[in-house]
Structures are given as C-alpha cells and as structure tokens.
Amino acid sequence: MKLEFIALGNLSVSKSNMRYARKAPDVSDILPTVRARGVLQPILVRPSNQPGEEGQCYEIVAGCRRFHAARIVAAEREEARIGAGELDEPGGPDGPDSGAAMLPCAVLDETDDASAVEASLIENIARLDPDEVSRWACFTRLVKEGRSIAEIGSTFGLPDLAVRRALALGNLLPRIREMYRREEIDAVTIRHLTLASKSRQKAWLALVDDPDAYAPRGHQLKSWLFNGASIPARHALFDLAASGLATVSDLFGEDAYFAESEAFWALQNAAIAERRAALIDAGWSDAVIVSADEHFHSWEYEKTAKRKGGRVYLDVRGNGEVVVHEGYLSRKEEARLAKGGNAGPEGEGDKPVRAELTSLTQTYVDLHRHATVRTELLASPRLALRLMVAHVIAGSPLWRVQPEPQAVKSDAVRQSLDECRAESVFDARRREVLAALGLGGDDATVTGSGYGAPGRNVRSLLARIVQLPDAEVLDVLALVMGETLAAGTPEIEVLGPMLGLSMADWWEADDAFLDGLHDREVLLAMVAEVAGEQIAAANAKEKGKTLKAIIRAHLAGEGGRTKKEGWVPRWMAFPPSAYTLRGGVGTVAAHARAMTAMEDVGKDAGESDGCERASDPTDAALDAEVPVELVGADGSPSDQVTTQQAA
C-alpha cells in the first residue's frame, strides 16, 4: 500500500464499494468539515482497468462519501472563481473535472473483489465516535486557541447548541466528568447535576462514597436538588423577566427552574385568578380552578359548548403547569340538561355510550343545515315575520339581538361553510340589504353591531326603512331573522319541512365532512347508500380509510363507478334520522323535541275549536290576511297594507 494524491477526475466508485449506488450518498454531516479542512483521512483506492485521459484511473474501495463531498466542494470553489472572474467557464483550473483537485489516497495492490469488499466494510464499521468528555477536552483546547463556537460547529458539522453542551461539561467537577466518561452515571443524571452548584455537587459525591447512604440519580436527583419542588420556568403564566425571580438552568440551556417555589406560587396563583376572570368575561358560565392535590379526569365530564353552559377547568399541576380544559360539564349535569333526548340502547341503563357523531361532525351538520334553512327562509318573508314575533315573545339563546356566531375551531369546517352555495347566496343578499339600509357594505352582519354604533340607532334606521317598499321591508326582515336564527335548535327542524327544502339542492359532501367521520358502522351504512348493499357487505372488514375512499369514488363517479347524485347523509336530511341505535345525534334529538311540541299544539287547537283541522296548519295560517301597520317618518301611522301568501 502506498499514499498518493490523485485528481478527482481520475477517481470513480467501485462496484465492490458498500456504498455503490446510482444515487449519491448523503454527505451533509461531513460536508462542513471538508469545506473547512479538506479530506484529511485518505480514501482507499485500487487501479482501474479503465484507462484515463490524464493518467491512471482508480476505483474507490472505501471513502465514497468523502469523494462525493470533495466533488461538491470543488464545484462550489469553481463557481466562486467564475463569479469572481478568475475563470471563464467550468472545467478550468481547479475545476472538479480538470484533474487539478487532488485527494489523498491509499492505493491498494491489485486484489480480487472479495478483498476489496472486506476493505470497504472494515473501513466503514471500524470506527468509534469520541465520548462527550473527550469531545469537551478537544473543544476546550480549540477555544483556548481562539476558535469560536460557530467555527467549531462549522468545522465538525455540529449545531452551535451541541458545541455549547460539550463545553458546558466544564462546569462539572472533574470526578463527575470522569464518572460520566466511564458510564457510571447516565445522561439524565449528568444533565441534572449541571443544575447544582459546586458545593451541591460535592454533597452528592459524598452520598456516592457513603455505603450507607443513597445517592439519587435520574429524575430523583432533580427532586433532591430542589428539595422536592422542581418548577420549570416555561410553566409561568406571568412575565418571567418582570418578576425578578431567580432561575437555575442546566448545561443544555433547554430547561430553567425556579430557585424559590414559594415566590413562584404567589405570582402564579395571582395569574391564575386573572385568567379565570378573563374567561368569565369572555362569556363562559364559570371557570373552575382544580388545585394541585386534585385531578381533572376527562372521562368524568362531557364536552359542552359555551352557549349551552359549558365551563372552563383550570387544571393546576404540582410542577406549576396549568392545563386549560374549555367547554366541559360533569356527566350528571349534562344528563340533567339532556333529559328528554335520545336514550341509549335498551339494557345499558345509565352506562355512558359513545355518541354516533363527534362534536366536530355535529357542528358541521348543524352549520350546513342552518345555512340552508336560513337561505330558503329568504323566499318566505311572511314566515320569517311570524318566526320573529315568536322570538320576541318567547325569547331564544340569540335574542339580544345578535347574529348566529357560526363558531367552529376547525379551519377545514370553517372553509367548507364559507364556500358552500347556501352561505354565498345568503351573503350576497346581505350586501344588498346593507346597501338598501345605507350601512357599510363591508360589514360582516346586518345585526349585532351593538347599541349606539354609528348609523345603527333606531331613529336613523327607522327613517330609512319607512322609505322602502313593503316587499323590500319584508325581505330585510327575512334576512335579519336568518342572521339571528340559532344553529342546531328544534326551530331548524320545524322550518325545514315548512319550507319544503331539500338539502341535496344546496349541499354535497366535501373533504371537511368525510374527514370528520370515524365510526366504521356509520361508514359501512353510508357505503351501502352510495354504492349498494353488495359492495358494503364485501368491504365489511375494511378500515375506515378504505370505506371513505369508496364513498368518495361513488360520489365523484370515478374509476368507472356510477356517480351517486343527490346523496345526503341521514343526519342532514329533513327530517333527520340516525344510522345506529346508540344515539348522540343532535339533529335527531332536536327533531324529536320539535315534533312533540308541534303535536301538542295541534291537539290543543283541535280541542279548543271542536272542528276538523286543516291538513297543514301552517299553510292554513298563512292563507289568512295579516295586516301590517307601517309608521311614517314623523311617527304617525301610515296606510295599512295586507300581506298575502304568494301563489
């Protein structure tokens, strides 16, 4: 074997090299070192049978990654020289293929392929990375020689944090470093020891030397250092810099802990109280603080929306962390609120059952059906008038007056609602009403701006409205009613059949809906609806992802499948129904309550007049003429007009 410097252009990777492949290997870890110092360790080569244009060619037996890294660096330097005007074109002096870029090579005698494979494998596996203490010693010498942390990191291909970690081992006593080198203590223990002062380190070593004492290690060591209370600084809800509290950091610079736990809790408890007050001001019915000696178990609670009385629970942990759980009620409270809803399957008693819909899908269903109902309501202003009168008399969760917030945390569901046809039609009509009333065309809603908002007081609005034709006034009323109609309520279930609407005319399944489905029983039933019972039976054991793909393919008519037109899931239809017996479908429960109320009203009406009721009481009521008194601009009564149901 002899050592030579060979041009890059005369080198190629041997097929016997363990890294031989068409794709260049990853050299990101050694590239910074090659850029800074070049290739220091010779690569193993042997003469090639292929003659070269500029001398003998060699094939690389071991050192493929160093070869590729050297080619990258040579190309970079050539581009830099071209940019500086020193070279006119690639391939000039010092170019990667010019033969002038040289690599140190250990030239093997001509051997068989087996010997070359052995050399390649030995060269790649017979390596031992230096331990962290040895690395600390080397880096310390480099710093003393004037090297910066950035320069050391660039030379060895390490991030600055890794260099700082190695250098920070100098904060430990020499004996502790030596114990770490001999693997007598692990990385977790050494990390926590860096939190200790020199005197505290000596006290720990004394425990190690005492045969009758116990020297804590790992996470127990952290408790020993902080006398049982280690509170990370990242858990503080207050301004750490302004508090002036002392913290202790480990050598890795990732974690810092409060030196005085009592001072921390005084500020933390005050911040928790402020957070609780802010949550109540935001509209939550209550914000309950769960102390560190108690626990918040999610299985003891049910997710409940803010508008339905949900609370916020501030779960305070012993390490200072505060976990916020928004929108929960205890199961008993939820049961009291839900009395009269769907019961679970027979025989399960009070045992909680898994709802058929997730809260996200239920919100999706409620909002899409709500958007459809209120858009259809635009064509029935007389019905909207009567609905508005009912709101005034009986009240509703929204009658303050404010618009339906259409709140949802999922960006996908939010985008789906914004892009649906019903919402687009409704918003276009809103722009027309805002213009007719002389209000800002960019306002988000007609209602809900708050009392005393500029241009929205009763006097100025009334002066504009009396100038509008009767039909346009009723159109405004219909839109305002649509804005203030609560989603997911029994009123939606009553209005849908009255309006005679079909969800298929306004809605079609999208990714936001299908991605929110996770129940296999429900997905199988949907497959049967869109693809047929035979296909559903054949895929009965498939995963939910496969079932969704089948549904998507049939709804889109892809892959030679017949497109399923006008499909609407049972939850979204009018009237709605469930896919299972488990319950938990809000639209079905709301529909049941609505039908019960309608039946009660029908019975009372039949008993009071003693005559046969019309087949459709709503149509019979709308057939009557309803006088609407208008008020002039001066406040005096204007002409009475009679509204009639359009044929």
Image: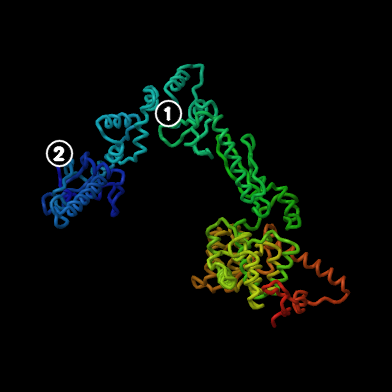
Looking at the image, residue 44 sits to the left or right of residue 502; the answer is left
Looking at the image, residue 388 sits to the left or right of residue 205; the answer is right
Quadrant position of the N terminus in the picture: top left
Using the image as rendered, state which of residue 28 and residue 66 is in the foreground.
28
Q: Is residue 51 visible?
A: no
Rendering coords of residue 161 (x, y %): 37, 38
Q: Is residue 184 visible?
A: yes
Rendering coords of residue 219 (x, y %): 50, 31
Which SS class for mark 2?
A: strand
Q: Amino acid at mark 1?
A: Thr
Residue at x 74%, y 49% (from the top left corner): 350
Residue at x 61%, y 72% (from the top left corner): 504
Tell me the colour scheme of the image.
rainbow
Query: Residue 2, which numbered label?
Result: 2
Looking at the image, residue 390 sits to the left or right of residue 363; the answer is right
Rendering coords of residue 320 (x, y %): 55, 36
Q: Which residue is mark 1?
A: 194
User: Residues under labels 1 and 2: Cα distance?
Assistant: 49 Å
Q: Residues within 10 Å of mark 1 (few under 14, many from 20)?
A: many
Residue at x 18%, y 42% (from the top left corner): 105
- Label 1 or label 2, whichever comes before in sequence order: 2
Residue at x 81%, y 70% (from the top left corner): 602
Using the image as rendered, state which of residue 100 and residue 527 is in the foreground.
100
Q: Is residue 75 above or below residue 135?
A: below
Quadrant position of the C terminus in the picture: bottom right
In the displayed orientation, state which residue is furthest to the front.
634
Q: Residues within 10 Å of mark 2 (few under 14, many from 20)?
A: few
Query: Residue 52, which numbered label?
Result: none
**Residue 296 lies in quadrant:** top right
Q: Amino acid at mark 2?
A: Lys
Q: Is residue 189 above or below residue 574?
A: above
**Residue 122 lies in quadrant:** top left
